[in-house]
Image (spheres, rainbow, N blue to C red):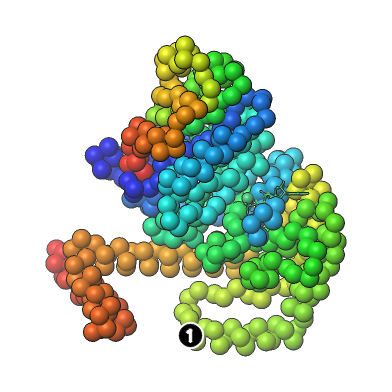
Amino acid sequence: MSDRPIKVLIAKPGLDGHDRGAKVLARGLRDEGFEVVYTGLRQTPEMIATAALQEDVDVVGLSILSGAHMTLLPRICDLLRDRGLDDVLVVAGGIVPDEDVPRLREIGVAAVFGPGTTIGEVAAFLRERARSRDIA
Amino acid sequence: MSSRAPDPAARAEALATAALAGDRRALARLLTVVEAASPVGEAAVRTIHTRAGRAHVVGVTGAPGAGKSTLVNAMLRELRARGRTVAVVAVDPSSPITGGAILGDRVRMQEHASDDGVFIRSMAARGHAGGLAATTNTAVIVLDAAGFDLVIVETVGTGQSEVEVAAAADTTIVLEAPEMGDEVQAIKAGLLEVADIVVVSKGDRPGAERTANLLRTMLAPLAGPHDADEAAVEDEDRTTSGDRTTPRRARPRTPEVLITTGATGGGVAALIDALDRRRERAGSGPIADARVRRAATLVWAIVAERVRADLGSRERAAETRALIRDVAAHEVDPYAAADALLATRDASVRRDEEGTP
Ligand SMILES: Nc1nc2c(ncn2[C@@H]2O[C@H](COP(=O)(O)OP(=O)(O)OP(=O)(O)O)[C@@H](O)[C@H]2O)c(=O)[nH]1
Ligand SMILES: [Mg+2]
């Protein structure tokens, strides 16, 4: 039971239409043994929070390119909390200016993975920080 | 273990009560424990099983990329317009090497994400303790008990267990994308045999009408009184080698062949009408048969899993491993080993019974 794979939701909030990075991450995590629910482009914070709830994921991974991260990420974290998903690990990937990172950490984004991050690093972080595999 | 509530039954009760009262988070967690085949999951299914049996369970299967998820999305739209609530279980293959999976069906259904009358759950195919059929069928029981009018199960039509899952539904829809040649993917995969309704998807593509006619021609010879007799004879033959408790799937009457365009919703209303016609006859006939088959699949999966778990349990593992090694060394034949394992199990069950005051 405790060795069930970690379940990760990968979503691309915001309006910019390009999800190569998110897809590469999804495939990379699959190859690392994760179960990856991929929800695709142009997801609203509400869609992401509902998908996270219905799928009962351990991790929500958000791919950010648009520069709208300072409005989108707090909104998503709020919605997750509203729905009682406090134990879900939230991480972001993409281009986020260094000065925004502390604020994102404050609102509940556990890590911001910049462009140079390898899949192995992301996988290691998720394995270490995702909630107990024992919830079942 | 330590983080788990001391009493699985109490935790199951709490989860089940909340889930059945409409708490979606509890429902999602209930599906997780069922998927993990944990004691909590088992206890929960036991308490809610009598509440299930009302939903119309619909399997959707077909070759990879046939348009299943897009069709399910269009079905959700039509069903919601008719006021029905719908749950979807979308099964995707796992990598046999890493155990990982990309669960990508949901992408096509995200427009329903904020509709409380729709609940979508993705599942990876491999690595379930009791097998895929047991896991999906218990997930279906949970969603049925939670009150959804329909439960749709999408699986890819390759792989024995995936096809089994779709075939275990009350109504099985097999998709076939328009083909240019005379090839029919669904025949190669043995899918037409389990179809209650055959749908040619991507009706906006050239060749849809032609593919539908080809399928109608292929399916037509299955009908007729003569064939029914042959099917009965064949039934007898098969049951002699198998068990008599799992009813074989009855030869389908000629399945309807419909054309849909999932991308636009074209033809989907007619498909839902066809589902409703079947549903109206649910008390008897094909759906009643399907339910007996589904129950049999699930019960046998649980029996197999229990026997296996017991023989592989810590107390017996050494003995079992030794026997298996003897088989590998060709010192014991596999049937003798299996009989010996079952015999030790029977003996210990008797001991347990005598030992209990
Ligand atoms: N032209 C056309 N393309 C379609 C239609 N439905 C699906 N497609 C396309 O077919 C491809 C596969 O669609 P899906 O709905 O994901 O098919 P699927 O059978 O669920 O795929 P898997 O789950 O990966 O096996 C996508 O590129 C869709 O855009 C349709 O009605 N018309
Ligand atoms: Mg699909």
Q: Nearer the viewer, residue B77 or B126?
A: B126
Asked if the beta carbon under badge 1 is closer than 8 A to the nearest atom of ligand 1, the reply is no
Q: Nearer the viewer, residue B345 or B124?
A: B124
Q: Is residue B43 left or right of residue B254?
A: left
Q: Is residue B308 left or right of residue B99?
A: left
Percent across and percent down for residue A76 are 53, 23
Percent across and percent down for residue A122 are 42, 34
Q: Is residue B305 left or right of residue B152?
A: left
Crowding near the residue tagged with mark 1, few <14, some 14–19, many ≥20 C-alpha atoms within 10 Å: few
Q: Mark 1 highlights which residue? A: B241
Q: Residue at x 42, y 65 (%)?
A: B301
Q: Is residue B15 left or right of residue B142?
A: left
Three-letter amino acid code at the position of disc 1: Ser
Q: Residue at x 59, y 83 (%)?
A: B235
Residue B313 occupies quadrant? bottom left
Q: Residue at x 60, y 46 (%)?
A: B105
Which quadrant is the C terminus of chain A positioned in?
A: top left
On the question of residue B226 being in view, the answer is yes
Percent across and percent down for residue B191 are 65, 68
